[in-house]
Amino acid sequence: MSVRRAARAVLGVVAEWLPLVLLVVVGPGLVSVAQMVHDPHLTWSVRHPSTSDWLFRSGCLVMLAASLVVAVRDRRRAAAAATAARWRMRTETAERAIARLAREELRQVVNTLGVYSNGRVSLFRAHHDDHFDLVARFSLNPTFDHGPGRGRYPMHEGALGKVWAEHKWFGPSLPSAGAVGGPPSQRWIEQQRRVFGVSQDVAANLTMRTRTYGGVRVDLGGRCLGVLLFEDLRPLPGSENSHLGTSPTQDAVFKAFTEELGTRLAALLEESGAVACDTWEPYRRALALGNPPPPLPGP
């Protein structure tokens, strides 16, 4: 396989530079040699050409042929670049449309649950059984809605891993995460490690210190496409510090995650996977968070 790749690379270099070498070096070189040959000089004879005539004509033919090859190649490349630009624009439009539709679906879920600024709902797409990509997220709290997010989410870690493995999962509330603006409590960090397998460093840097998690796996036709995840800063009724407000219960969350919603989100996840490109990851993540996207990477 490595020999084939090396051969293709060599052929590619030859095909790229040979016409230019013929046009700039070989053709003019033959013409110059023709003018330097003194016996005989250029006669311009058609029937009895001299050595100089043959050299001169050969040089002109080489330059003409190389010019045609370069012109045709440049024209094809320009057409291919224009086609690529059109498809790139269509792909960008598709990315924006998918993110907007998904965020609108999540906005309706948040309104149905009535979590206001305490919760958020996120949609993740499974990527080759290796990790999750964030497709869309919505919260009425700007910090949780437009937060930085993570580039990739491990497949078998955190609440996402629980939902992915069990199809439908809703966990007990975690301990209080501590005062807003201060470092997270050690009890909360320890529960993140013990329950979800999240390292201390990752837990300490989470933007949202969630106490209640729940979610469902999004499937379509027997294929597992992603996860719909609910998070709330507040605990469930009857938990520690529940007098400060409580999260929607498991029944309320799963009632909001209807089968019709799952079907619509599955279609969006499938289309998202069709247009996704790894080099566009920062662009897609910005769209998922409702932020202005960065410039697209080059082709």
Image: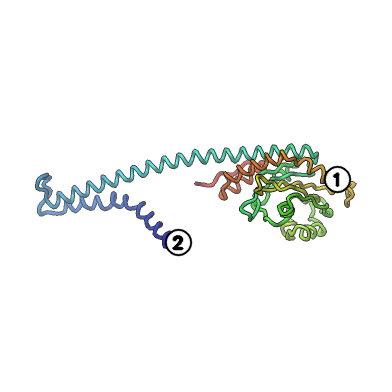
Q: Residue at x 44, y 42 (%)?
A: 81
Pointer 1 or 2: first along the chain: 2
SS for callout 2: loop
Does residue 107 lie above or below 231 as drawn?
A: above
Disc 1 target residue: 246
- Disc assigned to residue 203: none
Residue closest to the eye, 155 or 144? 155
Specify the farthest residue to the front: 222
In the foreground, 208 or 180:
208
Pointer 1 local density, CA inside 10 Å: few below 14, some 14–19, many at least 20 = some
**Could you say whether the residue bearing mark 1 is in a helix, strand or loop?**
loop
Closer-to-camera residue (289/84): 84
Give the amino acid type for the residue marked by disc 1 in the picture.
Thr
Residue with the mark numbered 2: 1
Residue 205 seen: no
Residue 254 point in image, percent of width and height: 78, 44
- Describe residue 204's horizontal placement relative to residue 270 as left or right: right
Closer to the camera in the image, 131 or 217: 217
Residue 230 position, x and y percent, is 76, 46
Of badges 1 and 2, the one in the foreground is 2
The image quadrant of residue 197 is bottom right
- Amino acid found under the numbered disc labelled 2: Met
Label 2, residues with CA under 10 Å away: few <14, some 14-19, many ≥20: few
Residue 65 position, x and y percent, is 27, 46
Q: Residue at x 68, y 49 (%)?
A: 149
